[in-house]
Amino acid sequence: MSRNTFKILGLDSAARPAALILAATLAVAATACEPTPPGGGPSPGQDKTTAAPGTPATTPSAEPTQAQGKPGHVFVINLENHDYNDVWGAGSAAPYLSKTLRAEGVLLSQYYGIDHNSHPNYLAQISGQGSNAMTRLDCPVYAKFKQTGTSEPGQVKGTGCVYPASVPTLAGQLSSAGKTWKGYMEDMGAPCQHPEPGSIDDHHKAKVGDQYATRHNPFVYFEEITSSPECQNNVVDYTHFADDLKSTDTTPNLSYITPNLCNDGHDSPCVDGNPGGLESADGWLQQQVPAILDSPAYKQDGMLVITFDETEAKTSGPSGIPGGTAGGRVGALVISPFTKGGTTSDRMYNHYSLLASIEDIFSVPRLGYAGAPGLNSFGPDVFNAL
């Protein structure tokens, strides 16, 4: 979320009832509280793979060849609020990400967020649901979703933040398929941490020693997860990640990683005195990513995806991608034994594409907009190592 968007959490306890009324009024008054209908698919010209500047070019072919095999351990890291050119351009303040890691993977140059502010993008990645009036406000109140109907593809209509148990998630799919998953949330402390239903979320602003943001933890917004013991077991503090990486057996099939509000680049400066922004995010990646790339699970069949939720400038992208590009062009980097380092794909993707790709990898049905006709999932343009 932009730091200037919603300030109610600075109010004292006496003002909280008014804040609750304000949030509810905004939700009811919003006119665009239903998911955007799906659009058309990408044009053929948006489907090529090229070598990055300064790397050897491969011989172009009409139909790229898919690398043999597929990932069995997926790692997703979400960073915050930066435009594509700021991150991946020549003057990037994140040289480890934009240069060192860039040389090891394929850059998805036409990858987009699905909406503003932050929250809808995280929800999209694990459910395929579109945004609504309250999620676009980053859910300052942990309010239950009030459903008014359904629509295609697989959408629940209405407004609110905490979806009922009838709304499926990637986590539930993986568990049903006998796969493992965990959400690793930096600074969360206690597992499955979230506000009481109907209360104000007091983790919208960072505090010294506690820079966890509930809205960046999508798992706790689905009762399918929070009503299950899996939430306590699988939605855990990031400190558990290092031990889980030690062997293939203890590394989940899906590791979904959210740094804190400083290390994800959201805050600048940070409450702990660190600079924040891309500088802090890049430093965090430099400390943490080598352990992933050196892990037994990654070396066996891993795929690391690093992306951003939305653009800071509240820009949007072109039409033609199911689920939309209203979150702006953010880009994504995919590093894997199945990808060729230093390459670029300009195929059209968004956060629903990431969900669809993970579902395809683990052979589970596509949820919501991930299943919309014309949506691209990762193909030979990404899995291009031969």
Image (spheres, helix red, strand yellow):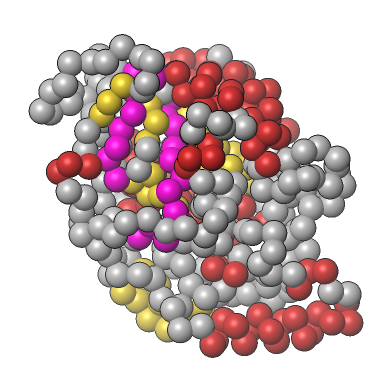
Relative placement, left or right, of 106 versus 58 is right
Tell me where residue 174 sits by quadrant.
Answer: top left
The residue at the point 79 percent across, 45 percent down is 270
The residue at the point 38 percent across, 44 percent down is 111
Relative placement, left or right, of 39 versus 191 is left
Task: Identify which residue, 175 or 164, lies in the foreground.
Answer: 164
Magenta highlight on residue 333:
yes
Q: Please tell me whether residue 254 is drawn above or below residue 232 in the rendered image.
A: above
Secondary structure character of the magenta stretch overall:
loop
The quadrant the C terminus occupies is: top left
Q: Residue lying furthest top in this view?
A: 56
Position in image of residue 370 (x %, y %): 32, 53
Magenta stretch: give its range: 324-348
Task: Identify which residue, 231 or 53, lies in the foreground.
Answer: 53
Task: Identify which residue, 129 or 252, lies in the foreground.
Answer: 129
Q: Residue lying furthest front in this view?
A: 91
Relative placement, left or right, of 355 versus 274 is left
Position in image of residue 58 (x %, y %): 23, 15
Position in image of residue 157 (x %, y %): 41, 77
Tell me where residue 316 sits by quadrant.
Answer: bottom left
Tell me where residue 218 sits by quadrant.
Answer: bottom right
The quadrant the N terminus occupies is: bottom right
Q: Please tell me whether residue 152 is drawn above or below residue 212 in the rendered image.
A: below
Relative placement, left or right, of 209 versus 226 is right
Q: Please tell me whether residue 94 is drawn above or below residue 308 in the rendered image.
A: above
Position in image of residue 69 (x %, y %): 28, 22
The residue at the point 45 percent across, 78 percent down is 33
Task: Identify which residue, 97 or 53, lies in the foreground.
Answer: 53
